[in-house]
Amino acid sequence: MDYIIYFDIAAMAVMTVLIIAFYLGRYLQTYQNDRLVRLFWMNLFTAAFDLFATITQDPSVPSNYVVQTVFHQAYFISHPACLWLFYLYCNTFSKQENKQAYEVRIILAVPFILTSLISITNPVHELLFTIDADYIYHRGPLTYFFYASAVFYTILSLNCIRYAKSGINRKLKYCTIAFLLMMVASVFVQYIFPEFLIESFAAALVLIIIYITLERPGEFIETELGVMNSGGLRVVLESLYTMKEPFALIVIKFHGIRMIRETFGEEYLRDLYQQIMRFINQNYKKMHVFHYSQSTFAVVMTDYEEAEFMKMAIELEREFNGEWAVGDSITHLNATVGYALCPKELHTIEDVDDFINVLRLSVRGEDKTLLAPDQVDMEWITRKRNIERIVKNAIGSDKFQVYYQPIIDAKTDKIISAEALVRLKSEELGDISPEEFIPIAEEQGNIIWIGEHVFRSVCRMISANNLYKKGVEYIEINLSTVQCMQSNLSERLMSIIKETQILPQYIALEITETARAVFNKTFSDNIDNLSKNGFSFAIDDYGSGNSNLNYLLHLPFNVLKIDKNILWDAFKESTAMIVLESTINLAHQLGLKIVAEGVEDQKHVDKLKELSCDYFQGFYYSKPVTEKEFIKLLADQSKSSKRRA
């Protein structure tokens, strides 16, 4: 019989290319993919054994009984193995796999084991195939057992799809059915027309479709960074938890990424991330890195020693809380690193999600930057999610309210200014602290709207109440660092000034010291333009841990606001009192006015007056109050002055 061997040759070529593409690409380290690549190899072997077994039947090719028998035996082992492996692959999608007992899995492997034993022992019984004196192959009666085995695994595979997890889409079902139908059809065709060796080629065609359509290698890869995304992480976690395989998890949350992007641009951030990925790949080759979200990465390790893993977590925390050079620029990275052993400490995928999200929503400046699951408040994530939703829904509404905390002149004990403070009220959670919702608003990109809302509200309040006639020289408004990164900031604020018909000198813009991390040309140009338009500036929270004299020397600040902790510490430690005194003296020598925040009792007042502090702000005089209450305070102050006069 003249066999057409080109189908086997084509199958070998297709499977070779597919295997090379699989290993050269960034594939997911999952039990599912492990089974798939084994199926690739087995189909390659099946085509090769079929080809060589056929070639050795050619009378023109020197051959012998042993060589031909071995190739036929190998074919009758590898071909059933393909269907058995395909069943195992389909089983990874089933909700039943992790519930199957070890004994059940052994029982389901019995048909494959029997076909293998029949193939191996065929030289003894010759019931599977025979080879005559002319080296011609003949089927035996046990060939039908192989067909029965194929039907058995076909039914099992279809049953896996029936119990597939809810996340599996219709493409899986179609491709699985297509593979099984193709295999059955090719077996039928080859049985009727034995000269057409098409089984392996038919399987190869469907495996290409499965790899491209179902495995979707490109869907899980971020090509610019060369790492997998959150979808890839989800697939890996499902596989690890399903197979109950232990693994180590490291979560890296970088703080201030939005500011870095706004300051240096998207290309700079991409270069920074690429540099970080190169560092990890060069130094920690056992790690599989996933880009979970904008500023959060997850690292999974399946081959590790616990002591080695802990050492890596500590090293990463140290490396990612320091300076990184990208081109000619230096960026000071701040990161929180979480670590966990799974499933020992995080028992389910949901636990992993919560742990990652707790770290993802953590804010810069927290006490600890290296955290284990028992060191974080996992319930905190629920509140954060609620605040995220509340902030998002509050944009464009009146739920953001502006309060005013009076600032007192040290010489006259009168209100000469106030700081505008935004508050968020929720029917669900009540009053939400700015320390909670401001970082979230920055992450969401809503801080610009909130900042302009506060600015417009203050301008309208000044205009409506003629504050300058009530003795108020200006109102302080916090300007977020993200706002300072907007190239059109000056135009936007000036348009509100014109809209509300007030003068810029009635506004002092407060900038926190944390803005030093993104100090650049856009930032300084905005301050210069606003200063030229008549705005004054105050540096807020001075001494909170990020003091930068460069600000005081090169930017047009008029007021320095001393952080409340400096004042409070000064009454506890003599060295802190020296810092307070030196700060006030330095500011006066630079021609700046001083506002002391956190003034809470008469001792504070007396000492600050002794040190010639210019202005006081704190609960001793007033807590933040509504616009109506602030106007009443001014009215009461005016009445009191008239009575004394």
Image: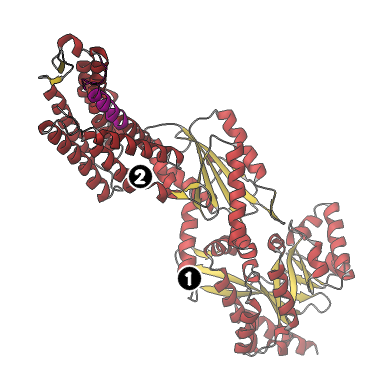
Seen in the image, is 191 located left or right of residue 344?
left
Q: CA distance from mark 1 to mark 2?
A: 40 Å
Q: Amino acid at mark 1?
A: Ala
Q: Nearer the viewer, residue 415 or 379?
A: 379
Disc 2 secondary structure class: helix
Q: Residue at x 35, y 44 (%)?
A: 215
Foreground: disc 1 or disc 2: 2
Q: Is residue 25 left or right of residue 594?
A: left
Per the rendered image, the range of residues in magenta is 43-63
Disc 1 secondary structure class: helix
Q: Is residue 124 above or below residue 152?
A: above
> Which label number is shown at residue 364?
none
The residue that appears at 50% across and 76% down in the rendered structure is 398
In the picture, the disc for residue 215 is: 2
* Label of residue 394 in the image: 1
* Left/right of residue 559 with respect to residue 495 in the rendered view: right
Q: Is residue 30 left or right of residue 292?
A: left
Quadrant of the frame with the N terminus: top left
Chief SS of the magenta region: helix
Residue 613's x, y, as percent? 84, 70
x, y percentage for residue 170? 25, 50
Q: Tell whether position 51 is magenta.
A: yes
Q: What residue lies at 84% left-to-right and 63% top-to-bottom?
A: 583
276 or 418, nearer to the observer: 276
What is the quadrant of residue 64 in the picture? Answer: top left
